[in-house]
Image (cartoon, rainbow, N blue to C red):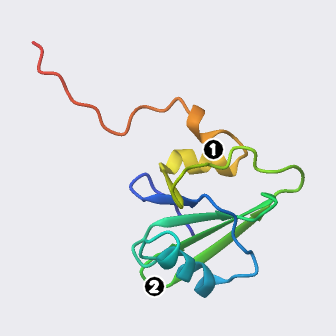
């Protein structure tokens, strides 16, 4: 079962992906286009050209998990756009994106903040 934890690194492919690709094709795209190791435990997210479906690829140490979600209506309006091939998200931002929300507008606490030493 795929379990996305807070500690997991999440990379979203900005450009659309050919959804005829399976695990091997997406793993190759991770290496070539995203310049990342598909065996690293990173969660990779891909969308199709019409943005009506999302695929997640992750290696759990024993093998790959490939998960696909097809939207019953509409399109993913908030897919990240960047000058790079991939955009990094936090785990809670990926959950918002998969539910059709805007991950940039989440009101979560920052990932790390310094502790002040005021007495």
Q: Position of residue 76 (x, y in %)?
A: 76, 50
Question: In which quadrant of the rendered view does residue 23 lie?
Answer: bottom right
**Above or below, 109 relative to 103:** above
**Above or below, 24 relative to 59:** below
Question: In which quadrant of the rendered view does residue 72 lie?
Answer: bottom right
Judging by the rendered image, the residue that carries numbered circle 1 is 96
**Disc number at residue 68?**
none
Q: Residue furthest top?
A: 119
On screen, residue 104 versus residue 112, left or right, reads right
Q: Secondary structure at mark 1?
A: helix
* Inter-mark Cα distance, 1 to 2: 28 Å
On screen, residue 55 versus residue 11, left or right, reads right
Q: Residues within 10 Å of mark 1 (few under 14, many from 20)?
A: some
Asked if disc 1 and disc 2 are in contact, CB closer than 8 Å, the reply is no
Q: Residues within 10 Å of mark 2 (few under 14, many from 20)?
A: few
- Residue shown at 63%/44% (left/top)? 96
**Disc number at residue 62?**
2
Q: Position of residue 47 (x, y in %)?
A: 70, 62
On screen, residue 77 versus residue 89, left or right, reads right
Q: Position of residue 38 (x, y in %)?
A: 46, 77
In this view, the residue in front, 75 or 67, is: 75
């Amino acid at each position: 079962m795929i379990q996305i934890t807070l500690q997991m690194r999440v990379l979203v492919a900005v450009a659309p992906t050919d959804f005829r690709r399976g695990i091997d094709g997406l793993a190759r795209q991770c290496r070539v286009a995203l310049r990342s190791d598909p065996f690293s435990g990173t969660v990779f997210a891909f969308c199709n050209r019409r943005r009506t479906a999302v695929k997640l690829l992750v290696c759990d140490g024993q093998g790959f998990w490939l998960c696909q979600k097809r939207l019953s209506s509409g399109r993913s309006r908030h897919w990240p756009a960047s000058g790079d091939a991939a955009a990094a998200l936090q785990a809670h931002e990926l959950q918002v994106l998969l539910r059709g929300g805007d991950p940039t507008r989440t009101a979560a606490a920052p990932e790390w903040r310094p502790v002040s030493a005021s007495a």
